[in-house]
Amino acid sequence: MMIKNWGRAAVVGVSALLLVACGSTADSGSSGSSGGTGGVKTDFGVTDSTITLGVMGDRTGVFKNLGEALIGGNELWVADVNAAGGICGRQLALEIVDHGYKADTAKTLYPQLEPKILGIVQLLGSPVLAALKQNLIDDNVSAAPASWSSEILNNPNIMMIGTTYDVEIIDGLSYLQQQGLIKQGDKIGHIYIDGEYGGNGLRGSKFYAEKHGMTVVESKITSTDNDLANIVTGLKGEGVTAIVLTTTPGQTASAMANNAALGLNVPVLGNNPTFDPALLSSPAAGALDKLYVAASSAPFSSKTPKAVEVATEYKAKYPNSPKNAGAQAGYVEGLVWQAVLEKACQNGDLSRAGVQTALKSLTSVGTDDLVAPLDYSSPGAPPTRGVYIAKVDQNAEGGLTEVAPLFTAPDASEYKAPHQQP
Amino acid sequence: MSERVVTERSSVLVRLRTSWPSVAGVAVLLLVLLVFPVFAGVAYLKAGQYVLIGVVGAVGLTLLVGQAGQLSLAHPFFLLVGAVSYAVLAGDSGDSGDLVGLGLPPLLAVIGAVAICALVGLAFSPVSGRLRGIYLGVASLSLVFLGLYLGQSLDMLSGGTSTGRPPPTFDLFGFRFANSDPAPTILGVAIQKQQRLWYLFLVLAIVAYLLARGAVRSRVGRAWRAVRDNEAAATAMGVNVARAKAQAFTVSSAFAGLAGVMTALWLDLVKPDENEFIGTYSITVAISYLAMVLIGGLGSIPGAVAGAVLVNGLPQVLTLGATEFGWSIGTLSPVLISAFVYGAAIVLVVLFEPGGLAAIGRRLTTRQGDR
């Protein structure tokens, strides 16, 4: 029947294809070439005058506030480096794309971006990261993720900046215990979003609880649950003495509001992404004072000199952009790349493979204390275990003030991350 | 019965003789699709593959919604079942050994995944057979939530929401759909993983198209349409209504399962969603598929293809173009613009041309439709 029609068409097409195909084999053309000034070896994204790095950020999706500040931080870093004469005699350039926090968009954008760049300064979003994992490995592209789960450290091309969610929680809980806010044998509630983010945070509280004879009351939610009244009521019934949050900022607001409204009033510890300065203008603003945030990058209002400098520059350059710790985090991503590129330049190899070699040889990347010194020599382990503890403060710019300088709890040093080599 | 087959065949033959321009058109289209990897970069190839996934899914849905008249929002659930089944059937137990993987040959795993989806669809048919219209739509939506819950809790199958699991590389009698060195070339362009996947997806899409067309033109399709138009009349004509409805749901689920396998291969990842609204197997996807079949024209298979091109292809191409050529319209992102375009397309179709793109196409070619 009609199949014949199709069959004939297919035969025409296939035979035409066979005519042109000539089924021969050839070099796949993906190997590097050497050349450039000063005998530096290069392959992708590096010319005699420019080093091009990629940014896959979010300007339109659910994390656009954070994403905009991160991109701002990246750009500030590039401007600073270029003003100081560049790296390896070359100016830096960024190729920025916006995937809107959608894995399918990122999957198509990546092949367009990849041939133009040496590596990725910022790769935002855990679904995006998961979808691009194999691409990064196949093309040997090193990437600094804007996602801090220790689960992704089994990818050697991931350049983690700062510490991971599990370690944040371990450090945070030890801080609470040091301050006498929780004690041995307590019950702790942990509200977390099921997924890479929440699952990783939960690892931290489970580890800490086991070490200190505490019990974790787990409450799993999805990222779209906005009313946590039931959950907080449940935790109150369990008699928890502290709540840990690995949630979205909106959920943090609900948890804090209910913590106050139900008269529970226990200290609450949150991972870095749980807080957004926008919460200070939400109805829950008055109930946020019990929230402690453990983060490996300094808060926007940090008194660390470099953080102050970045914040000032950022406000001057992007007066209308959201003010949050993304600015410093974006700048730090750049600083780590800077250390790697300088090392690679020293080694005379600015190819992608050269970047990997340089990265693994770095044992202490200083970032002017924006994050703790980073050690990339042991694959699978977070490069640092230090965090800043900050508390919500209505009067501070960015809504948080530091209550403890950069610190690493002994328990955090003992903790074994999921992909850490023994 | 045999008489009818004979007359049908001769009428097709008559039309075949007279419609050689359409044969030529199809041949040209096929040829363009075959050499697409030669002139398109990997990024556009990736977008093209995404369209082909949409084609397979939308063709399956248009059979169910358009031909059999059952509104279903459960498509993402079957995509998920297909993707996970493929990973389980062909996969291994993973680095840490806590995943279920049977290690079957990938081709067998694809067939198995499609069969599993068909069976799951069949299992839902008691529900789909009893409900109609919006009630069925809502009931089928519950499957998306079920998928979300199962994907999260059965992490030995799905890999869990934290990391997911990598789908095994597809291979066909030893030919791997991955990068290789040396690689075969066409017109000097190396046929690597993405080019190979394009051809694989193209073949799958064509097979899906032909199977669907076969179903629509056969007794099965006539039974579906009879049930859609009037169940009592269909019964009177000897159609087993319950069976026809179950059949449509099963077939449609199988198509969705194939699209799910393709999604896993396309993303290099099987990972259940973290919430029901955004993600690979979410409500948004259910609505996208519904949009494809609506824009294309309910029940029309070429229409579903056109709908898939518009809904799956447009955002991708606009995003690529925005970076490549610096297209921008104020603060509107390409994704937003394409959402407006297909939103507007649905409204326009419903208002002015309920037959969708298919009806417009038919009018342009002044050829009577095959419905």
Image (cartoon, rainbow, N blue to C red):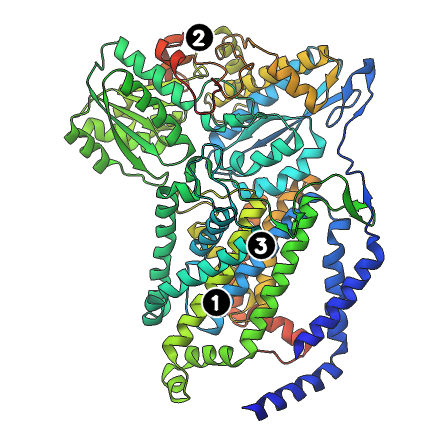
Q: Are discs 3 and 2 located on one and the same chain? A: no
For residue B369, what is the image quadrant? Answer: bottom right
Q: Is residue A15 left or right of residue B249?
A: right
Q: Is residue B190 left or right of residue B258?
A: right
Q: Nearer the viewer, mark 3 or mark 2?
A: 3
**Lower position in the chain sequence, tag 3 or tag 1:** 3
- Three-letter amino acid code at the position of disc 2: Lys
- Three-letter amino acid code at the position of disc 3: Leu
Q: Are marks 3 and 1 in contact (CB under 8 Å)?
A: no
Between residue B34 and residue B156, name the one nearer to us.
B156
Chain to which the residue tagged by mark 1 belongs: B
Q: Which residue is mark 2?
A: A303
Which dot marks residue B107?
3
Q: Secondary structure at mark 2?
A: loop
Q: Position of residue B218 (x, y in %)?
A: 54, 79
Q: State how far apart marks 3 and 2 are (Cα).
A: 60 Å
Q: Position of residue A24 (x, y in %)?
A: 83, 48
Q: Nearer the viewer, mark 2 or mark 1?
A: 1
Chain to which the residue tagged by mark 3 belongs: B
Regarding residue A211, the answer to whether it shows in the image is yes
Q: Which residue is mark 1?
A: B251
- Three-letter amino acid code at the position of disc 1: Val
Q: Is residue B364 left or right of residue A299?
A: right
Give me the residue at 76% from left, 61% from top. B31
Regarding residue A85, the answer to whether it shows in the image is no
Between residue A165 and residue A90, name the one nearer to us.
A165
Image quarter (top left, top right, bottom left or bottom right) of the C terminus of chain B? bottom right
